[in-house]
Image (cartoon, grey):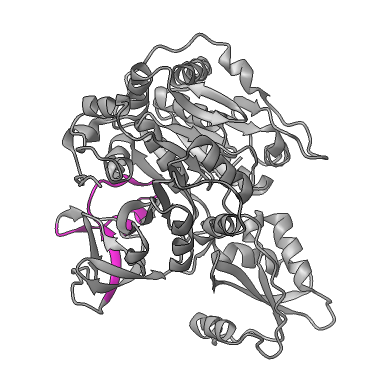
Amino acid sequence: MADVPSSSRDLDRANYAAVWDAVARAVPDRVAVRADGAAVTYAQFEQTAARLAATFVAHGLGVDSTVAIFMYNRVEYLTTLYAAYKIGAIPVNINFRYQGAELADLLEMSRPSALVYPAGLAAAVVDAADCVTLPGLVLVVPDPVPPGVPTGPGVPFATALDADPLPAQPCGPEHKIFMFTGGTTGRPKAVVWTHGNLFDSQQFSIYGSLPVDPPTSLDDVTRIAARDDLPATVCLPLPPMMHATALFNVMNAMVLGGTVVFLPAARLDPGAAVRAIAEHGVTRLVVAGNAIVGPLVDVLDAGAGADVSGLTTVLSSGMVWSDGLKRRLLAHAPHATLVDIIGSSEGGPFAYGVVRGPQDLPCHPRLAPGAVVLAPDRTPVEEVGQTGVLAYRGAMPLGYHDDPERTAETYPVIDGVRHVVPGDWVRVLGDGYVEMLGRGSGVVNTGGEKVYPAEVEKVLLAMPGVVDAVVLGLPDPRWGEVVTAVVVAAPGAGVTAQDVQDEVGRRLAGYKKPRRVHLVDEVQRSPSGKVDMHRLRRRLTDAAEPPGLVDPVVAPDRPGRTR
């Protein structure tokens, strides 16, 4: 594995559109994307993006215009991203599970000049249009339409490809990329990366598993991508590209002149994923911890008959990935390096857990170059056994869009050096290794999706017959955490656990539904109205069947997925 430096000065001048343009010139006939049985070469990919970019410009889009992408993983997602990059526009990642009101909120915040979505999600767009004015350019990607879904506004995506290709435009490292994240506020906020800083921060993920000297210039980047003697990079992202892990790793694969494979369905089909790995010779698999690896190894253990031994790298970030599932996966992919990245939309990487074989288990993450553990007084924590929060001092985002207060809080300047400190607590193990303890806030991370309890509580407290409610996350071996609701109903109201789940599912995205519902007579609160969350969490975790509680557990909807 190459020893990639934390920063290469010429590389922080990079822009993804300029890099991809150069790769397309260097390897025009190489396959860039495989999807729906078709193969798209780099030359075709670049030309299609250039035509879409021309349409964007014709509709007044340019540098810092925003383009909303409300879509599953598919080739049009990547084309839209590339086209936006070509003109310095800012793609806006929107969770495709959002319903109308949630979509409207994000459109209002991002104020896009264009919206691209598949026909199958038209219902949410129609509902959002009742609350917010849609942008002047709305493109509809052809997609199977479920029964009862209305025809949505907009024109066919294909019509935007009739324009002559836009000639290459100046693309600078200062151009921006938004990564909307739920964070701890409930209301999504955009982390603002520049192309240059993002490219610089991704050097390990791009080149760390290849037998090459790390590039020191953009010419080196193109030369590495064009080399035929290097192992082929074939990347299959299983989480949705609306999340940073999948998006950034797909972008990285294209920097290498690799091939990106998309599955044909919007939700995870582990059998189809295993078959695609074997059929297309996937070398880089992007997962979301146990939530995705669990179903995959279940299929493999059952004797799928598919050879996945060609996998060389499996990457996950921000999700629980147990040693047991790592061991089971290695039994089928013995040559794979498993990389468990501790990072966040706000920046990083903070640490890597790298497993090259069973001998590396149990796996503990090791601090990345530029990462440090800080005490509450913001001094480094080095003594074994002590705890602190992860911080990073390398290339990082500019901060949160239009939120200087939260930017100052998350990106403090310490002893003259800017840090990013999202709030993840760890215990120091020595020799750079740490043990993850979790984030100090109450945000619930379920299958890679962030759920803010107050947003769900607001829906529950508006239900007829509900007099009190508390929402929290409880540990789960597959999903990391499951959303759990403790609900107090008025006597005789007849509120059931199913009612609770149905109401949240009607108002919010499916992954925000409580998967465990406890109906209780009372939630103990202090005189100030606060709940002792540590005590409540301990009670629900330690007691399999707490007295007086009903605990119907419903299998979570697939939180991470691709179309």
Quadrant location of the C terminus in the rendered image: top right
Position of 423 with respect to 483 (left or right) is left
Image location of residue 281, percent across then percent down: 48, 37
Quadrant of res 517? bottom right
Task: Specify the farthest residue to the top.
Answer: 164
Q: Which residues lie in the magenta part?
A: 387-415
Tally of marks: 0
In the rendered view, would you say 494 is above or below 248? below
The one nearer the camera, 266 or 110, is 266
Quadrant of res 34? top right
Q: Which residue occupies 74% across, 68% down?
A: 500
The one nearer the camera, 173 or 275, is 275
Image location of residue 288, percent across then percent down: 49, 54
Q: Which residue occupies 29% across, 69% down?
A: 434
Does residue 42 appear in the picture of this structure?
yes
Position of 192 with respect to 200 (left or right) is right
The one nearer the camera, 22 or 312, is 312
Position of 262 with respect to 431 (left or right) is right
Quadrant of res 123? top right
Image location of residue 387, percent across then percent down: 28, 75
Q: Is residue 28 magenta?
A: no
Task: Specify the farthest residue to the bottom.
Answer: 547
Q: Does the magenta stretch include residue 401?
A: yes
Q: Which residue occupies 17% across, 36% down?
A: 9
In the rendered view, would you say 109 is above or below 57? below
Position of 218 with respect to 506 (left or right) is left
Does residue 449 appear in the picture of this structure?
no
